[in-house]
Image: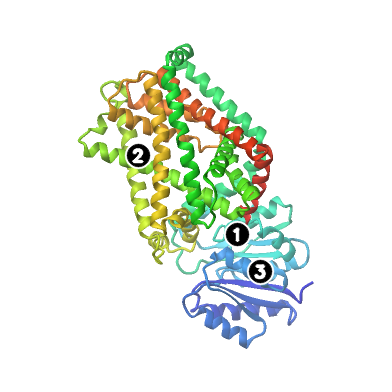
Amino acid sequence: MTNREVSVVLPAYNEADTIEHTVEVTLSTLADFLPAGSFEVIVAEDGCDDRTPEIADRMAAEDERVRHVHSDDRLGRGGALEQAFRESHGDVLVYFDTDLATDMRHLEELVESVRSGEYAVATGSRRVPGSEQERDPERGVASTGFNALVRLFLRSPMYDHQCGFKAFDREALLALVDDVEDDHWFWDTEVLVRAQRAGYEIKEFPVEWEPRGDTTVDLVRDIFGMGSQILRLWWQLGVRPRIDRRVTMAAGTLLVVAALALMTVYLDPRAVLAEMRNADPALIAAATVVYLLSWPLRGLRYRDILAELGYRERVGFLTGAVFISQTGNLVFPARAGDAVRAYIVKARRGIPYPSGFASLAIERVFDLLTIAAMAGATFLALAAAGVDVTAIGTAEAGDTGASGRTAVLVAGGVGVAAVAAVAVIVATARSDRNLVRATLGRVSSDSYVDYVAGIVERFAGDVQTVARDRRAFAVVGASSLAIWGLDVATALVVFAAFGVDLALWELVAVGFFAVSVGNLAKVLPLSPGGVGLYEGAFTLIVFVLTPVGTSVALAAAIVDHAIKNIVTVVGGVASTLLFNVSLTEAVEESREVDGEAAVRE
């Protein structure tokens, strides 16, 4: 037992005008039904920039029942609550919004529901039968929709998940919050849903509620933010636990088989095999050599990335580590091989796991930006040369001409956006200004914008880790361009092996788009190595943008991907033998470490 029975936490951000009144009302209400000295009121002040900290300090100095928990940085509503709950002394932990929108006559029922030991969680409800509320239509529609989605996707029987009027048994809440990922407005819902899944008894009772202040629906928080969080929690609780290696393998295999079966409706498999038999073996061998040349560059790039993080290793070892991790992606689903590299460099070179995962993230970001930037550069170069890029596929492809023009324009637009993004990231790498939050802050003033900004910041931060050193950025960027250039060149040689007759500019453009879209399709964790996904996307792009027949397009896609996978597997097997590494053990170890790293983040 702690030395207090009840701790009430008031989450406060810039509440200088109301916080003193809220604390006084809270103390008076608690004193009406609790013994003296059995409760405390904590102002969880979340990085305020007004007079709220000064007022909270003064109240804490004047009344021993009041405490002030301060944060220099914005933690978000949920983050501020968690910090205050951990520092509280009560066995019953309570919070409600400082605007006192919920009638305080309900506070005794809220507290006693948990204090009695009958429930582990209690929450007021504005939507359960018997509750009374005044709500503007816009906010009412948003709330109804949100709660309906939570009930549908998260199988919650409750009526109101976001009411800021809740109480918890201390042990129950502290057992739950370690798994709660949201730090902002979805925190309430996530705690309730996880409490239900954990089997805790929850009481939802009607309250009288009257909105205070601005109730305008916030686009970022209410639509994008809350919706994405519902899907995230649904995936974590309802889908991911059911997806093991066997299920993923089976689903991916079925998907590939179904795709191949459907493909036979539109083309003759014998024609595809005939095209593969007629391919020039000398050019296929040349394509293999071209692809092999990219692997030392992968090791060089990884060396330069690690060097920026303070670790210097030999290119040969790092090339082998890349081989093994990429082989893991081919053998195991869901790109499980990505984290293998962090395990290998830790086990063989002592590089800490956080640095290993950071280096992998930086590499992936450069890959993504390079693919998109090359698309934009190709698009702009063709336009500058006076080539009508919208004419690709128009004359020969018949009905696919419009789709071809659309695909080229979209790819070009994405590429141009990526070039602009790289320019902005590099330009701001050494700046103290936080342009991400400043820009998103113009879209929404709600604190949930911090969550969205955090995602963008992590993406930009990975690049800025290298971009702060302009020479290193140029070196890593150049090696990324060379790696992907050789990847595309491999496909171009394969096209030549199949006798594809296109103008050079058209061949280069289509080759790049086919390879880039195929690799982006492989990101979906539906089959080991993206087998089937790459071929399907590659074939579609070639068919849409050129007069090349589907049989030739599919045959080229299969051979191109086979060359790259065979080189990867051979290199991976050789590296595992050289380093005496068990790929299965590495995957299992890296999964555990990756999970621990995610918790730490």
Residue found at x 67% / y 32%: 246
Between marks 3 and 1 in the image, the one whose residue lies nearer the viewer: 3
Q: Nearer the viewer, residue 167 or 600?
A: 600
In x, y percent, where is residue 290? 43, 30
SS at badge 1: helix
Dot placed on the residue nearer the N-terminal end, 3 or 1: 3
Dot placed on the residue nearer the N-terminal end, 2 or 1: 1
Find the distance from the CA under tag 3 to the CA under tag 1.
Answer: 14 Å
In x, y percent, where is residue 459? 46, 53
Q: Is residue 412 above or below residue 456?
A: above
Q: Amino acid at mark 3?
A: Phe
SS at badge 3: helix
Residue found at x 37% / y 33%: 512
Find the distance from the CA under tag 3 to the CA under tag 2.
Answer: 50 Å
Residue corresponding to mark 3: 85
> On residue 375, which mark appears?
2
> On residue 188, which mark appears?
1
Structural crowding at the residue carrying mark 1, measured as other residues with C-alpha within 10 Å and reported as few (<14), some (14–19) or many (≥20): many
In x, y percent, where is residue 454? 49, 58
Tell me if label 3 and label 1 are in contact, CB under 8 Å: no
Q: Left or right: where does residue 248 sit relative to residue 198?
A: left
Total residue callouts? 3
Q: Nearer the viewer, residue 507 or 187?
A: 507
Quadrant in the picture for the C terminus: bottom right
Q: Quadrant of residue 253?
A: top right
Tell me if residue 156 can be seen.
no
Find the distance from the CA under tag 2 to the CA under tag 1.
Answer: 43 Å
Quadrant in the picture for the N terminus: bottom right
Q: Amino acid at mark 2?
A: Ala
Q: Is residue 45 above or below residue 159?
A: below
